Image (cartoon, helix red, strand yellow):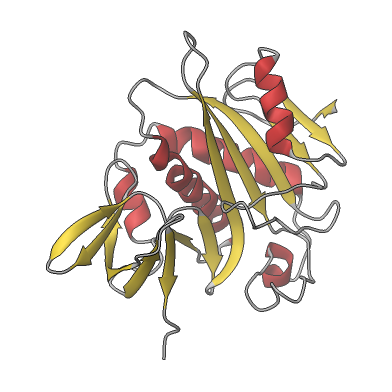
Amino acid sequence: MISWTVANPWSAPVFYVESTLSTMEDAQRLDEQGYPSGTVVAAGYQERGRGRRPERTWAAEPGKNLLFTLLLDLDPGFPPQRLPLLAGLALARSVEDRFGLEVEVKWPNDLLCGQQKLAGVLCQARTRPPAPARALVGVGVNCNQLDFPPGLAGRACSLAGLLGREVPLPGLLADILAALHAALGDGNWRAGLQHRLYGVGRQATIRPEGGVVSIAGRVRGVAEDGALLLESGGRIRTIYSGELLFQPEA
């Protein structure tokens, strides 16, 4: 693991490793070693890159994409389910500002461009009494990968594929860190997210985590704590977990 020269608004170390099992696991070890909030570990390749659901993996070609985990202290009372949305908002702003692309945030943790997945976020909370609560914010951005496995073909996209050129990874990481640092202090973050929220006004179904009863309704937005607001049965319901599914648009 080497130091990476990347601007970090937390003034904390940024590490890079060519290959690792998981940047999330690496960041967890750095946390246990006492590294400060804002520490980042990035990798060129992950053998055990994970998605939000246990059975899903993050498939990426070695050296092609931006894969990193951020250690982050959480203020007392901070709702952890808000964090992946703030990370998604930061990703959206970074991609829009640097590349001029139009992107959307799909609740709770995906960044889409043209309904194809461009990036994903995985957050894990850690408790370390009496120290402040801390989170691991894992991010994967498809940057310079042009080909995807058969199961992802047509469902995933990359910046290089959209732009027709390669993307420098350290500069994009610096942009994302700066945008996330700003988003954490943005009291108006919901307004920034609302017009980027995928599927607002559309009929959708929530497939619960480990449950058997799905909930159908119309997406209206997100609550202050990050819950999805779903209009169902004549009332607004707050949804804290589950997979958001849409019927293909005609």
Quarter that holds the N terminus: top right
Residue 146 position within the rendered picture, expressed as x and y whole percent measured from the top left = 78, 69
Q: Residue at x 76, y 53 (%)?
A: 65
Residue 41 position within the rendered picture, expressed as x and y whole percent measured from the top left = 72, 32
Q: Given the current orientation, which residue lies at the most extreme top position?
A: 130
Near-viewer residue (152 or 179): 152
Does 225 sit left or right of 125 as displayed? left
User: Relative to 20, does residue 5 appear above or below in the rendering?
Assistant: above
Q: Residue at x 62, y 41 (%)?
A: 138
Does 234 sit left or right of 86 as displayed? left
Residue 35 position within the rendered picture, expressed as x and y whole percent measured from the top left = 66, 16
Is residue 13 visible from the viewing direction of this image?
no
Q: Residue at x 72, y 58 (%)?
A: 143
User: Relative to 109, does residue 7 appear above or below in the rendering?
Assistant: above
Q: Given the current orientation, which residue lies at the most extreme front position?
A: 212
Q: Given the current orientation, which residue lies at the most extreme bottom position?
A: 250
Does 72 sit left or right of 80 as displayed? right
Near-viewer residue (240 or 162): 240
